[in-house]
Amino acid sequence: MKRYYIISFIIVITFFLSSCAGHTSRIQYEDKYIPDQDSQQYSFDFGASGGIAETQEGYYFLSGPGNRFLYFYDKKNNTSVQVCAKPNCLHDNEPDSMKIASCNAFLGVSVSNLIYYNKSLYYITEDTGPDEMSYELWRMSLQGTEKRRIHEFKEIPLELRIHRGYVYYLTNDGGTIPGKEDTTKSKYTLSRFSLEKSGDEVEVIHEGEGIYGKTAGLLCYGNNVFYSVFNYLDATLQSFTENSYRYDIVDEKEQVIIEEEGSGAWTIFDGKLVYTKNTGIFACNFDGSDIHKVADEYGQLSSNDDYLFIDNWWDLDVLDGIKDRTVTVLDKSYKVVKTISLKGVRPQAYGCSNEYYFVQDVGEPSAIIGKMQGKVYEISATIHELPKLQKLYRIRNLVKYGDTIVAQIVTDVPPRGNVREIHPSLEDAYLYFSGE
C-alpha cells in the first residue's frame, strides 16, 4: 500500500536531453535565483495537493490518504519514505484515526503550499471552526520532529510564496454577489510580512476592488514579485482587463508591465519573463519591455536552467480524455527539442527542477471521480451568506431563488448547515485539482 501512494501520486521523468527553527542569514539582492533565500516557485507550481519542495538531497511532497502526509524522495537512492522515524509508527497505514496525529509525517486534515526555505519546511493548514475556517502557516524541521505555528492569517491566503526574508500572499474576499454585479465588488490584495521579525504585522503592497476582481499568478524571482490583477469592466461581464504587475523589493515600488492582456500563467526562463496566452507563448524583460512571441504552443509553463516546458494538461479535451496529454520541451532558442507523451496521466503538473519533471497522476476519469467522493456538496443559504461561502469554499455552480441561493461546492471538509452530498463530476475534479 505504501508503494501504491508513492508511485501513483508522483511520476518522476528523468531528463535525458543531454533542517524547526528559522535560520537568519544575510539576504543577497542580486537579480538572479539564490538557493535557500529565494522562492523555488518559478519552476514548481502548487495546486490542490500541496507542491514540491526541493533540497540538495531530495524532494519533499505530500501524499497518502487526503495528501496529509509528508514524504521525502531521495535523489541518491531513488526511494520515497514518510518523514517519520518513530518506532512502530504505521504512518498513513494507521487504521486508528486517533493515532494518526502522533505520526511526524502527518501535517493536518487539509494541507497546502509546501515550501522549502532556508533549511526549513513551511506549509499552510486549514482548520474548520463553528463558523469559519482558520488558516495557519507552520514551520517544521526537515526531519519532521519540530513544528511551530508562526502566523495565523486574518484572510484566506490564496497563493503564497516565501522569498528573501518575507512571506508574500494574495487574498480575495469574494465580495461580488451574482445578480448584483452593478452594486457589489470583490476586494483583493497582495500582502507580505517578515519571517524573522516578531509579531504578525502585515504590509499591504497592492489593494483594489472590482467586479469579480482578483489577484493571481504570484511569482517571485530575484528582486521581483510578479502578479496579475483581473476585473470585469461592467456588470454585463462581456469584457474584462487583466494587468500584470512587477513589485521591486529593493526600491519597494510597483509598476504595470503588461496592460490589458496580462497572464498569471508564467515562469522565468533564460533571464526573461515568459507567459502563455491563447495565441501562444510570449517573452519580455522584467519591466515589460520587448514583448515578443516565441512559440505557438499553449499550456502551463515551467522551466529549469536549460529548457522551457509546456504542459497541455489544462486543455479540457485532455481532461476529458479526447486528446493526449503532452509536455513540449523547448531550448533557449525556443526550438522544440522533444515532446514527452503523458498519455493517461492526469490531471496536474507540478513543474520541474534541473533533474526531473513532476506530474500528478490520479488515474483515468472513473478513478478521478472516485477520488472526489465526499468532496462535493450542495448547500442552501441566503443571498447575504454568499460572501462567506465564497471565502470558505470553491463554488462550482450557483442558482438563485429570490433571497435564497443553492450552491454546489468543492471542499475537503464536509460543511455544516443545510447541505447534502452529491455525486462528483470531472468538472468538480478539475476545480479541485487545479486549485481555481
Image: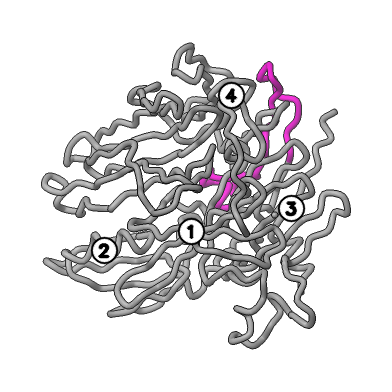
Q: How crowded is mark 4: few (under 14 residues within 10 Å), some or many (20 or more)?
A: few
Task: Classify residue 87 by image quadrant.
Answer: bottom right
Q: Is residue 241 left or right of residue 421?
A: left
Q: Position of residue 270 (x, y in %)?
A: 64, 21
Query: Which region shows up in magenta?
Result: 313-340
Q: Is residue 135 left or right of residue 11?
A: left
Mark 3 residue element: strand
The residue where tag 2 is placed is 388
Task: Kindly identify the amino acid type of the residue bearing the numbered disc 1.
Answer: Ile
Q: Sequence order check: which comes first, mark 3 or mark 4?
A: 3
The residue where tag 4 is placed is 30
The residue where tag 3 is placed is 11
Q: Where is residue 183 in the image (x, y as percent from the top left)?
A: 11, 47
Q: Sequence order check: which comes first, mark 4 or mark 2?
A: 4
Disc 4 and disc 1 in contact, CB within 8 angstroms: no
How much space separates mark 4 and mark 1, taking CA atoms?
A: 27 Å
How much space separates mark 4 and mark 2, taking CA atoms?
A: 42 Å
